[in-house]
Image: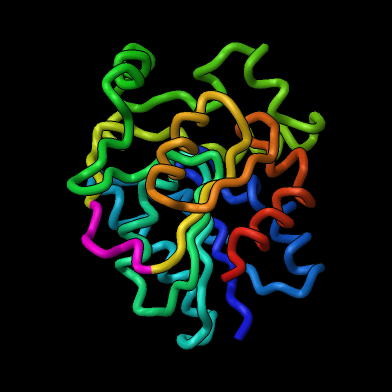
Amino acid sequence: MQPVFVLVHSPSTGPSIWHPVAEHLVAAGHRVRVPSLLRVGAGAPPFWPRVVDAVRDDLRQVPADSPLVLVAHSNAGLFLPVIRSGLDRPVTGSVFVDAALPARSGPTPVAPPELLDLLRPMAVNGRLPRWTDWWDEADVAPMFPDPQTRRTVVDEQPTLPLSYYEQHIPVPEAWDDHPCSYLLFGPPYEELADEARRRDWRVAHLPGAHLHQIVDPVGTARHLVELAAV
């Protein structure tokens, strides 16, 4: 049975970053789900269980025996182990796309100390600006192919609480009981791609900025299919 691609966006962004890729996968005959995590940071902690619930709830529309390929972008990569462990379904592959990696064991912090040092002064009443507002325009503009796409992506971004980035996410044992792979776009994720190689994962490189899936959805979809092949 052909697997269902489950495209998981970072809680810092929204599902629209995956919609162009989803369209190309569907056009090529693949089944796709794009769960929305936009309500993950809407209330009080804990946060990571809400990510698992959101993905699990979205998959209720998929037959229980359908194999899944989990695809995580950016810091959604940190949630992939708990997502996989929270699904009573067959998972045939996981692909980390320009993504943070979970620790080999033990809980993983969402943000390293240097990022928290950057974020804490930005917080107002405990809540942060939208992700794209953290950076200079010179860094943000090249990530988008056109103004309309930029408006769509920026407008749906949540203003997450600082406590979201202060959480630690469990890494269940044996979560990686299936082939894992890594798709690198570019800096600063080269070191994470190297770590994926050290874990004996397949690694591919599609040069681009951090939101390259909205710039080159065709190339991204092609790489996902190739990396998911077993």
Q: How many marks?
A: 0
Q: Where is residue 20 in the image (x, y as percent from the top left)?
A: 74, 52
- Please give the range of residues in magenta: 171-177
What's the magenta bit mostly, secondary-structure-wise?
A: loop
Compared with 151, 133 (above or below) is: above
Q: Where is residue 131 in the image (x, y as percent from the top left)?
A: 51, 28
Residue occupying the point 69% across, 44% down: 213
Q: Position of residue 214 (x, y in %)?
A: 72, 42
* Quarter residue 222 falls in: bottom right
Q: Is residue 87 in view from this perspective? A: yes
Question: From the viewer's perspective, is 147 left or right of 90?
Answer: right
Which of these two is toward me, 60 or 203? 203
* Quarter residue 42 falls in: top left
Q: Position of residue 88 (x, y in %)?
A: 35, 78
Question: From the viewer's perspective, is 45 left or right of 154?
Answer: left
Question: From the viewer's perspective, is 1 left or right of 87?
Answer: right
Compared with 94, 66 (above or below) is: below
Residue occupying the point 64% across, 36% down: 211
Residue occupying the point 36% across, 72% down: 87
Q: Does the magenta stretch include residue 173?
A: yes
